[in-house]
Image: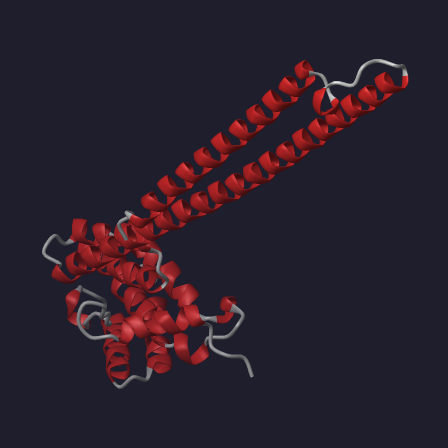
């Protein structure tokens, strides 16, 4: 058995909440209608209040057959479809009534001549986006709702919540990016240390090779009858070897000190970061 789609479960939850995230069918007397249309809307509203949303949907569709351009029938049909979202949701989102509902609300929010209904449609779209954590989209819908009805306190409260969520998300993304940059920097430092170590090893090998060559030359000189120099090598060669070793040791120590200082600065920066 297929499990309900989480996206539409959230949509159903938000339309079921009381208070700032509430949505409901419009009363039949909120807009002038023809008699048959009004009767179907009235019947649909009664069924809606009894939570018989599928039956209410049928009545709202009948009202639209009488008056296809009726904004109130369209809006009420969308609310009935949203209410059915959790009961009929499947892994295949195309089968979910909430898709049709969102399409109806989007059209009303854009083109409905009645500002009241347009604002309500924008508000419901904001709630849907909010439950999906699409904070930027929710913010725009709530702003549109307030443009239609500046006195809509629920839209204003939800707008503030969405803006707060958006700020928190942006800060979290910023922190994650900073952590990633720090990790990349640490990796680069480790690679640099490894390169320095390889370089020091190569220098040492070169120095050992040079020492061996000097020793071989001295052995050859002794075999050719030349006098033995102090400590097995000439004074000049000994000074050159000593100087080379001192230069190498000094360079290695400078690199180590520089790396430690850079790591301490990185640790202080991460420690002082504001979360």
Is residue 5 in view? yes
The residue lying at 28 percent from left, 71 percent from top is: 15
Is residue 114 in view? no
Q: Is residue 84 above or below residue 20?
A: below
Closer to us: 184 or 60 = 184
> On the picture, is 185 further left or further right than 238?
left
Which quadrant of the rendered structure holds the N terminus? bottom right
Q: Is residue 249 above or below residue 40?
A: above
The residue lying at 52 percent from left, 44 percent from top is: 187
**Horizontal and vertical percent for residue 233?**
73, 20
Closer to us: 69 or 45 = 45
Q: Is residue 187 above or below residue 199?
A: below
Q: Quadrant of residue 18?
A: bottom left
> On the picture, is 76 further left or further right than 177?
left
The residue lying at 48 percent from left, 44 percent from top is: 186
Q: Is residue 225 above or below residue 176?
A: above
**Horizontal and vertical percent for residue 254?**
48, 30
């Amino acid at each position: 058995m297929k499990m309900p789609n989480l996206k539409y479960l959230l949509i159903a939850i938000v339309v079921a909440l009381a208070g700032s995230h509430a949505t409901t069918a419009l009363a039949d007397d909120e807009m002038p209608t023809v008699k048959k249309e009004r009767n179907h809307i009235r019947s649909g509203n009664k069924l809606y209040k009894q939570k018989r949303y599928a039956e209410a949907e049928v009545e709202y569709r009948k009202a639209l057959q009488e008056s296809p351009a009726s904004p109130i029938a369209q809006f009420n049909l969308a609310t009935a479809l949203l209410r059915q979202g959790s009961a009929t949701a499947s892994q295949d989102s195309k089968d979910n009534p909430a898709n049709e509902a969102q399409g109806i609300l989007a059209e009303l929010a854009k083109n409905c001549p009645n500002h009241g209904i347009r604002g309500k449609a924008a508000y419901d779209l904001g709630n849907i986006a909010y439950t999906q954590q699409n904070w930027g989209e929710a913010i725009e819908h709530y702003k549109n709702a307030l443009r239609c009805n500046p006195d809509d306190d629920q839209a204003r409260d939800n707008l503030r919540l969405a803006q707060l969520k958006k700020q928190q998300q942006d800060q979290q993304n910023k922190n994650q990016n900073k952590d990633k940059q720090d990790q990349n920097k640490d990796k680069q430092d480790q690679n640099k240390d490894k390169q320095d170590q390889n370089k020091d090893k190569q220098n040492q090998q070169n120095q050992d090779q040079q020492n061996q060559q000097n020793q071989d030359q001295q052995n050859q000189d002794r075999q050719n009858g030349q006098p033995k120099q102090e400590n097995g090598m000439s004074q000049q060669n000994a000074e050159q070897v000593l100087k080379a070793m001192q230069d190498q040791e000094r360079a290695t120590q400078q690199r180590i000190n520089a790396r430690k200082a850079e790591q301490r600065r990185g640790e202080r920066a991460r420690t002082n970061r504001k979360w």
